[in-house]
Image (cartoon, rainbow, N blue to C red):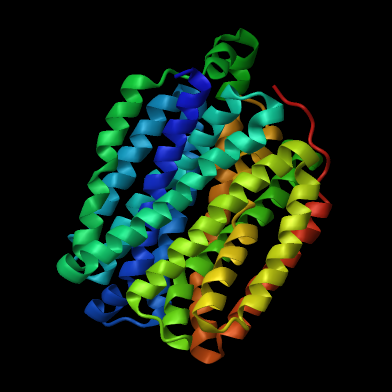
């Protein structure tokens, strides 16, 4: 297997395990709420705190990966979110759940951007869209894996048994460390004397070192925030919404989750091809407007067929765009700050967009599903407007 393919396989597997971990909360949420006697908004804060951990971990491990190398730090992040996930199963109160999910978030936040940087540095620019899409579908494999494991484990072992599965990524970390070499582009850049001084400067400052760069960073952060807010709003609460509004059982909502995830995978693969062929602006523009429409119309879906097919269509557009963010963000920043930029921007989106479950929980308690879906549709329209003002990317080394 050549180096390009190795970077994709490692990054896909890492994101699969991360996606599985995140979705465990969705399937275990009702049991956690019942055991600790908390309300919906307090339950939503579990995911939000995980995303705050992702922001902190993204910044920290992004800087470390730019300084000490992608692969070494990549394996450390996997260890950390595996430990945090397994410890969650031992929590005896909601405060401990918060702490352990924050630890898991630290590792997961670092893993995403480093994996995307590895892929961006291994693949030519005219194929980075599809390479990014290959990596991004790992999260949806994780969703499907979480749905299957939840159906098998929750009825017999409860929510704690589900989180004990989180120790598995430790094995994967050993495999990656043994079989994946460091990024040649990072090694070359690290050896250049003229870049050494630049490398030692504060990386976060470099994301705002000119008005144009600052505006690009802010715009990408807003787009990432909407992406995560939309995803969390759909995947964290929709299974519960559908159980209530459509009378779906836990197994039926798992089927919905798998159907939606399949739609997301097809959407991501399609988006990667679109991005390489038509460019970022056309691709994001089409998918953002289609997402706003699909999400709003989905609130009117009726019957099993409508729910399943509609979920796949919503997943196709709303999360198809996830495939493009790694390539999009990486294209604006040089190798010396690429991991920092990707991790910081996307995990800022995770932290702020991660507050969406709290707001959606509040909307559901006080209004209805149509109002919640309208909120998500408006978010996609905001992202579309921001995307139109994003300056044409420059070629970076």
Residue at the extreme bottom: 366
Q: Is residue 234 left or right of residue 99?
A: right
- Residue 57 image offset from top left, x and y in percent: 44, 45
User: Toward which corner of the image does residue 159 lie, by quadrant?
Assistant: bottom left
- Residue 319 image offset from top left, x and y in percent: 59, 56
Pick the residue in front: 194 or 9.
9
The answer to whether one can see residue 300 in this image is yes
Q: Which residue is located at x 59 percent, y 81 percent?
A: 301
Quarter that holds the N terminus: top left
Q: Which residue is located at x 83 percent, y 53 percent?
A: 388
User: Toward which corner of the image does residue 102 lie, by quadrant?
Assistant: bottom left
Q: Which residue is located at x 61 percent, y 81 percent?
A: 299
Q: Is residue 295 left or right of residue 24?
A: right
Quarter that holds the C terminus: top right
Pick the residue in front: 14 or 33.
14
- Residue 161 image offset from top left, x and y in percent: 19, 60
Pick the residue in front: 137 or 32.
137
Residue at the extreme front: 305
- Residue 367 image offset from top left, x and y in percent: 56, 90
Q: Which residue is located at x 44 percent, y 32 percent?
A: 9
């Amino acid at each position: 297997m050549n180096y390009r393919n190795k970077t994709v396989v490692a990054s896909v597997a890492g994101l699969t395990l991360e996606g599985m971990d995140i979705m465990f909360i969705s399937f275990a949420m009702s049991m956690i709420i019942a055991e600790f006697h908390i309300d919906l908004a307090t339950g939503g804060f579990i995911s939000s705190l995980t995303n705050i951990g992702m922001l902190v971990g993204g910044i920290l491990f992004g800087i470390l990966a730019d300084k000490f190398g992608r692969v070494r730090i990549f394996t450390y992040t996997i260890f950390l979110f595996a430990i945090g996930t397994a410890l969650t199963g031992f929590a005896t109160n909601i405060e401990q759940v918060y702490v352990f999910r924050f630890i898991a978030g630290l590792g997961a936040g670092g893993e995403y951007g480093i994996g995307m940087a590895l892929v961006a540095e291994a693949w030519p620019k005219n194929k980075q869209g599809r390479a990014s899409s290959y990596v991004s579908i790992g999260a949806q494999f994780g969703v499907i894996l979480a749905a299957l494991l939840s159906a098998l484990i929750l009825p017999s072992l409860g929510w704690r048994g589900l989180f004990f599965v989180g120790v598995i990524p430790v094995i994967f970390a050993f495999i990656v460390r043994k079989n994946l070499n460091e990024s040649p582009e990072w090694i070359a850049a690290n050896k250049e004397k003229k870049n050494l001084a630049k490398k030692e400067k504060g990386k976060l400052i470099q994301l705002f070192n000119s008005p144009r760069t600052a505006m690009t960073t802010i715009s990408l952060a807003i787009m990432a925030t909407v992406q995560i807010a939309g995803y969390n709003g759909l995947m964290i609460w929709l299974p519960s919404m559908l159980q209530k509004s459509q009378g779906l059982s836990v197994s039926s909502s798992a089927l919905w989750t798998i159907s939606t995830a399949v739609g997301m995978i097809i959407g991501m693969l399609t988006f990667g091809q679109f991005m390489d062929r038509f460019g970022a602006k056309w691709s994001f523009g089409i998918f953002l407007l289609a997402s706003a429409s699909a999400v709003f119309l989905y609130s009117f879906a009726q019957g099993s067929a409508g729910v399943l097919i509609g979920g796949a269509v919503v997943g196709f557009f709303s999360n198809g765009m996830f495939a493009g963010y790694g390539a999009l963000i990486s294209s604006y920043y040089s190798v010396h700050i690429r991991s920092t930029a990707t991790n910081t921007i996307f995990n800022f989106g995770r932290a702020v967009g991660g507050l969406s479950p709290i707001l959606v929980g509040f909307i559901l308690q006080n209004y209805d599903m149509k109002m919640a879906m309208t909120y998500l549709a408006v978010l996609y329209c905001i992202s579309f407007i921001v995307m139109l003002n994003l300056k044409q990317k420059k070629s970076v080394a």
